[in-house]
Amino acid sequence: MKKLRSYYSNVRHHQNHHHHHHHHSNIVSSERKWIFFPLLIGSIFALFLLFLTTTLTSPTGGVRFLPFTRPVLLTGSGSSAFVESKIKPQQISSLPSPPRFAYLISGSAGDGKSLRRTLLALYHPNNRYVVHLDRESSREEREELHGYIKNSSLFRRFMNVHMIEKANLVTYRGPTMVANTLHAAAILLREGADWDWFINLSSSDYPLVTQDDLLHIFSHLPRDLNFIDHTSNIGWKASQRAKPVIIDPGLYLNKKSDVFWVTQRRSIPTAFKLFTGSAWMALSRPFVDYCIWGWDNLPRTVLMYYSNFLSSPEGYFHTVLCNAEEFRNTTVNSDLHFISWDNPPKQHPHHLTLTDMTKMVNSNAPFARKFRREDPVLDKIDDELLNRGPGMITPGGWCIGSHENGSDPCAVIGDTDVIRPGPGARRLENLLS
């Protein structure tokens, strides 16, 4: 990540060198232009024909070039790569292509509007989204969310938001939470879209950076990295989580009820090492493939073990990832979240409010939780960090409409591959460097 500034400096140096060489060539060509003039006319005509045959109509209705070049944001004089000054075309091979994210956003009873707001704050046409309201929510609430997604002209256009209509029964702290996450991952793999990271969030989460910020920074990262807060030092969880045996009624009953304990206890596993951490993560597509397809038996074995483990979302993926030889060296020990805990942590984190705004920004994290529904701090995040209007999509480089008089800039769609990172990209760079 620290190579970003030198990278853009090298790009500018290459442009200056090319300009000097071009100036010298003009002197030579001016002396011999009587030789090259007929060739020049023929070349221009040939290039014009090539131009006609190498353009295509984009899915958004505009015209874009075939991938010879793509727009790049460069600075005018400073070293920062995040302050827009001008757009210059560069060879596509000189810049990494932006990644694509696949999100799961889940909620429960009463979370429909919060989930919709989080979806709008996270939306980008090139990403994929699965949303889920569990079975504790009412049929009316689920139908309202489904109708909103179905009737959105933007979502219909890009066909990248999928709602799980047959709601799953999800028990808090139970393995049904893991099953729901795996269900969403399987849907995203079945759709076959070209995405790079799977990110699980809830309706109580909210972004602190734009998708352009996130896409820009992640375009410079290896696509096999897994962002997961984890440790093998399970401490008190050995006696409170690993040894007790719990049953999740959500696995076999139609109505939701809490997990319960059986009297028999079990020993710490010796077939694999236990890891624990945050339930929120960004997993690489190769690792998600591994968990779903399970060409090695480890993901299945660990899943069956965690079906009787309290708070299994805080251990299943961590244990699989850190015990799998081909993935154990791909971890980044971060959940990419700002979360305010007691010390020592209690079962639930603090609800974030306006008083936490400075700490959230200074954390450099791209996401934060936990927020109460429609808390005023969400409006402040929209206004100061996301530049998002009420009820609108967070604008990105693909939004080319006007901001004037409260207009939605994303009502006019441009090239969805154009990325305009802002201050959030600088913060995220500091987090990862």
Image: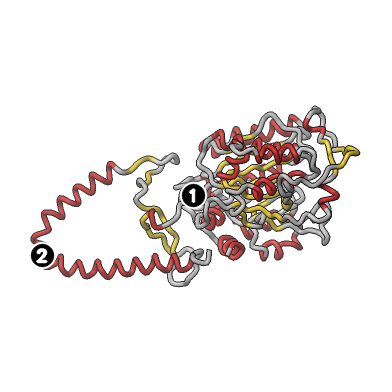
Q: Residues within 10 Å of mark 1 (few under 14, many from 20)?
A: many
Residue 302: x and y, percent?
A: 71, 41
Residue depicted at x 37% and y 58% = 90
Outermost residue on the front side: it is 270
- Report x, y in % for residue 427: 60, 64
Please name the residue that numbered disc 1 is placed on: 398
- At mark 1, the secondary structure is loop
Left or right: residue 97 versus residue 201 is left
Is 413 located above or below residue 36 in the figure? Answer: above
Q: Nearer the viewer, mark 1 or mark 2?
A: 2
Disc 2: which residue: 32
Residue type at numbered disc 2: Arg
Reply above or below: 37 against 316: below
Residue 312's tag is: none
Q: Is residue 401 visible?
A: no
| Label 2: which secondary element | loop
Q: Nearer the viewer, residue 243 or 131?
A: 243
- Choose top left, top right, bottom left or bottom right for residue 423: bottom right
- The colour style of the image is secondary structure
* In the image, farthest residue toward the left: 34
Q: Quadrant of the C terminus?
A: bottom right
Left or right: where 250 falls relative to 85: right
Q: Is residue 59 visible?
A: yes
Give the crowd class for mark 2: few <14, some 14-19, many >=20 residues within 10 Å.
Answer: few
Q: Residue at x 15, y 50 (%)?
A: 42
Residue drawn at x 81%, y 35% is: 248
User: In the image, what residue occupies the spot 49% across and 53% down?
Assistant: 397
Is the residue 137 above or below the residue 240 in the image? above
Mark earlier in primary sequence (1, 2): 2
Q: Amino acid at mark 1?
A: Trp
From this viewpoint, which residue is outermost toward the right?
A: 263
Q: Residue 340, percent across and down?
A: 76, 59
